[in-house]
Structures are given as structure tokens and as C-alpha cells.
Amino acid sequence: MIEWLPEWLFEGQFLVYAILIATLIFMGIVWKQTPRRAYAVTVFVLVGLIALYCLLDFLVETDHEQITHAISEMSAGVQAKDVNRIFDSVSKDYNRHGLDKDGFRQMTSSVITGNIVDRVAIWGYDFAPDYKEKSSPSDARENIAHVNFMAKPVGGDKGMTYLIKAVMRRDADGKWRMQSWEAYDAYHESKEPLHVPYLN
């Protein structure tokens, strides 16, 4: 994907499809009532734009989509009790409260093998317009991203619902992985992170 192009061009957003299809239907009616060449050309151009937008959505995975896919894979790994699958989406540079990737893996393995959590439901991804940044001015492209989402552990421990504020990193292989995160009260605004059982 060309970096300066907006990501919505490649994400198959419902609103874009709705606008294009509504315009196509409107122009089709106008063409039928007033059969002019200009209206016919407009109809065929709109059909081409819809096809092109669909093709771009199919061929290009945006940073938005890569990040949500990485987090979804971590959730799927919890449900499958597959620690390797979870940590394929955790950056080698992971660091949270001084805990590195190996330490986080050990804690997570204990939670998984102890059947403390059966799965983690994830929803409500939220990206700010300027969600990406460079970790250093000398970097060729943005390699740090911020995303918020809702998470609820489901299982024997009956965990609460959290607002997760995650930091993602584009690693050397080009893949986005989680570098750090904090959990907050999902329903009461607070600047203080919450303690997460077994993971803090």
C-alpha cells in the first residue's frame, strides 16, 4: 500500500460501498428516464469504481487490518490454548512494567494451562486519526501504532470487562505485533491503569 493514501481506500468500508451503490442506482434511474450518453458513461464509471474498490479491498491489507488481525489472533490463541499462536503476535521488543516477552510468556502460559481463562472476547477497535508514529525521526516509516479495544476474559475466573490501550510495533519483518498495553475501567473514565489478575 502507498503510505500517503488513506487506508479507507483499501478497507472495503460499508459506507463507501453504500455511497457508490446509491449513486449508481440514482444515475441508472436518470439514464433510463433520459437516455443520454453522458449518463450511460457515468453509470459504467461507477460500476468500474465499485469493482476497483472491491479489488483493492481484496488485494491490500492495511495497517488497520493487520493490527486488528494480530490482536484477533492472540484472542484465538487463548481459546485454542496455543501459547505459540498468541506470542506470534507479541513483539520481541515487548516491555510492560519491566516485564519482557519471555516473562510475559511464562505468566500467560500459567493462565492458559491452569484453565483460568477459556477465551478473551475482543471488540470495539478504536484508532485515532494519527494513530501511527515513528519511534525515531530517522525511521523510514511509521513503526509504532496505538489502538484501543474492549476485552473481556471469559472462563472460570469470570473476569471483568477492560478498555485496553495497546501499543503495537511494526517489527523488522514488516508485521505488526503488540509491544505493550494497559487495562482501564471500561465504563468509568479513569487515567489510572487497573490491576489485571495473573498478568500484573
Image: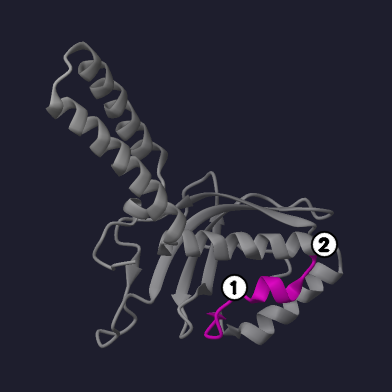
Name the side, left or right, on which 191 lies relative to 6.
right
- Numbered range of the magenta stretch: 81-95
Residue 111: in sight, yes or no?
yes
Amino acid on which disc 1 is placed:
Ser
- Quarter of the picture containing the N terminus is bottom left
In this view, which residue lies farthest toward the top?
33
Q: How many marks?
A: 2
Numbered circle sitting on residue 89: 1
Tell me, yes or no, whether the highlighted magenta stretch contains residue 93. Answer: yes
Q: Residues within 10 Å of mark 1 (few under 14, many from 20)?
A: many
Q: Magenta span: helix, strand or loop, mainly?
A: loop
> Image height check: is 142 above or below 76?
below
Comparing 123 with 8, the one in front is: 8
Q: Position of residue 71 (x, y in %)?
A: 58, 63
Mark 2, secondary structure of its residue: loop
Instruction: Give the residue displayed 70% in from the left and 60% down from the top.
Output: 76
Q: Label 2, label 1: how many angstroms apart (C-alpha)?
A: 21 Å
- The residue singled out by tag 2 in the image is 116
Quarter assignment of residue 105: bottom right
Amino acid on which disc 2 is placed:
Ile
Mark 1, secondary structure of its residue: loop
Q: Position of residue 80 (x, y in %)?
A: 78, 63
Tell me, yes or no, whether the highlighted magenta stretch contains residue 138. Answer: no
